[in-house]
């Protein structure tokens, strides 16, 4: 019995140590988002863009996005809009053409998913007579701020090769689910993405609102066909020493699932993809980080190791409650491994930073209600984390239906 107890205590000690290190590191990095240096646009339009829209049966939302993109503050002859009509069975392609986009239809039942669609589109794009300096990627349910291409042009002219824009929600107040999503994104944009940008660390890609230099794509290929093609491509870039960067000054809005069932299906796909990519790349990422002595690579490996900030908050909350309500009758002493000042201080910052993020980014007052919903939203993540781990080999793409035909004028 003593050996069993020692084994369990050893596991708890290892768990507590890992959570403490991860939480402290991420909390310190998040503090980098407390300040924001204005990055003025100083370059006139120079770059040409191929704007790609990934679409699968998106007839309900494709038209507002195309009309939105046609009105960007950028010379219209310096960008073309392509809609990847991927295995569509509705009239997405017809609507795309009617609204002035180039519809590229793909039918391949053996290779389903956004990653395969993008790979196919890029192969076709490189074979066209007209070539572009960069490729921009959106999802069909998106809306885009008018300065998007101006900002991307400026970042490219300043030497960036992969750029991620601010990701926002176009329907944050439709339900408690969409508000929880929105709060999570508002926090992540400020205290994860902007923080890393300020500290010179690589940013993560969000699957939409990203800009990639064409020469880089031709050099390394797309090669990202997992369920989380954005994470896979970003990881491959970082392995090469190419850090994705962040543009806090231009926004992309997308539609969040309204009901819990659709939300969990979407997040399950994200986590299955995350575990899959982590399993394939974390070893080489750690090796390259140590070999090259690059903190950015180590940070990226760190992100692959732990799924999301929500897990950090949950685990630190468990340790905090275990310590706070400990009456001395606790069977194991693992909750006392971390110093009280570290446990209480880190937990306090973890819960304070979301409030600060919303305040700094001037989120509407009713958005703060979402902070009260986060604990319940976090609870819905826990079964996803565990189920996704045991089903990470499942690479069947699950499509999220979009129905809100909102126009950019309504967002502003």
Image (tube, rainbow, N blue to C red):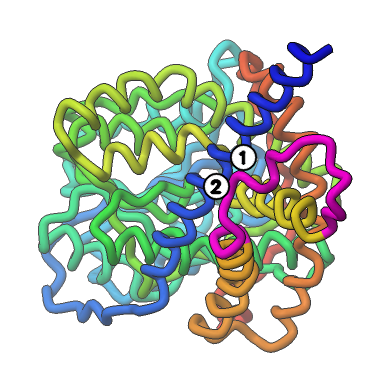
Indicate which disc residue 20 carries. Answer: 2
Residue in front for this viewpoint, 57 or 231? 231
Determine the image quadrant of residue 19: top right
Place of residue 105 in the rendered image (x, y in percent of width and height, measured from the top left) = 50, 31
215 on left or right of 147: left
Taking the magenta stretch, the answer to whether it contains residue 130 is: no
Q: Residue at image x 68%, y 59%?
A: 181
Dot 2 alpha-carbon crowd within 10 angstroms: few under 14, some 14 to 19, many 20 or more: many
Q: Residue at image x 41%, y 77%?
A: 34
Q: Are marks 1 and 2 in contact (CB under 8 Å)?
A: yes
Place of residue 193 in the rendered image (x, y in percent of width and height, measured from the top left) = 41, 60
Q: Residue at image x 40%, y 67%?
A: 70
Question: Would you name the residue on which mark 1 appears?
Answer: 16
Determine the image quadrant of residue 324: bottom right
108 on left or right of 251: right
Span colored in magenta:
325-343
Q: Quadrant of the N terminus?
A: top right
**In the rendered image, is residue 318 in sight?**
yes
**In the rendered image, is residue 90 in sight?**
no
Q: Secondary structure at mark 2?
A: helix
Indicate which disc residue 353 carries. Answer: none
**Does the magenta stretch mainly form a helix, a strand or a loop?**
loop
Taking the magenta stretch, the answer to whether it contains residue 330 is: yes
Height in image: 218 above or below 76?
above
Determine the image quadrant of residue 411: bottom right
Q: Quadrant of the C terminus?
A: bottom right
282 on left or right of 109: left
Q: Residue at image x 53%, y 75%?
A: 357
């Amino acid at each position: 019995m003593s050996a069993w107890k020692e084994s369990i205590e050893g596991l708890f000690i290892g768990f507590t140590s890992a959570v403490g290190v991860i939480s402290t590191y991420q909390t310190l990095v998040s503090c980098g988002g407390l300040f924001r240096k204005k990055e003025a646009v100083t370059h006139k339009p120079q770059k040409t863009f191929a704007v790609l829209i990934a679409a699968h049966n998106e007839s309900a939302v494709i038209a507002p996005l195309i009309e939105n993109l046609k009105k960007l503050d950028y010379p219209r002859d310096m960008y073309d809009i392509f809609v990847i009509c991927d295995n569509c069975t509705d009239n997405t392609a017809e609507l795309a053409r009617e609204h002035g986009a180039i519809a590229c239809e793909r039918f391949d039942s053996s290779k389903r998913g956004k990653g395969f669609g993008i790979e196919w589109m890029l192969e076709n794009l490189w074979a066209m007579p007209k070539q572009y300096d960069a490729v921009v990627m959106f999802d069909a349910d998106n809306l885009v701020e008018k300065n998007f291409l101006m900002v991307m042009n400026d970042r490219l002219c300043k030497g960036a090769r992969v750029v991620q824009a601010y990701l926002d929600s176009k329907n944050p107040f439709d339900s408690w689910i969409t508000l929880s999503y929105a709060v999570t994104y508002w926090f992540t944009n400020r205290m994860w993405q902007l923080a890393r940008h300020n500290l010179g660390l690589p940013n993560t890609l969000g699957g939409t609102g990203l800009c990639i230099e064409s020469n880089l794509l031709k050099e390394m290929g797309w090669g990202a066909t997992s369920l989380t093609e954005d994470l896979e491509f970003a990881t491959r870039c970082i392995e090469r020493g190419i850090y994705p960067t962040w543009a806090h000054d231009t926004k992309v809005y997308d539609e969040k699932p309204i009901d819990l069932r659709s939300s969990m299906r979407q997040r399950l796909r994200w986590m299955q993809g995350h575990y899959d990519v982590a399993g394939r790349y974390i070893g080489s990422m750690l090796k390259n980080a140590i070999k090259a002595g690059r903190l950015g690579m180590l940070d990226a490996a760190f992100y692959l190791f732990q799924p999301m900030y929500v897990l950090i908050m949950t685990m630190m909350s468990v340790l905090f409650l275990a310590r706070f309500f400990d009456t001395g009758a606790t069977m194991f002493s693992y909750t006392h491994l971390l110093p009280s000042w570290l446990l209480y201080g880190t937990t306090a910052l973890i819960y304070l930073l979301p409030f600060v993020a919303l305040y700094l980014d001037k989120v509407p007052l009713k958005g703060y209600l979402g902070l009260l919903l986060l604990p319940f939203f976090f609870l819905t993540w826990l079964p996803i984390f565990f189920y996704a781990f045991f089903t990470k080999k499942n690479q069947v793409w699950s499509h999220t239906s979009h129905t809100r035909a909102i126009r950019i004028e309504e967002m502003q």
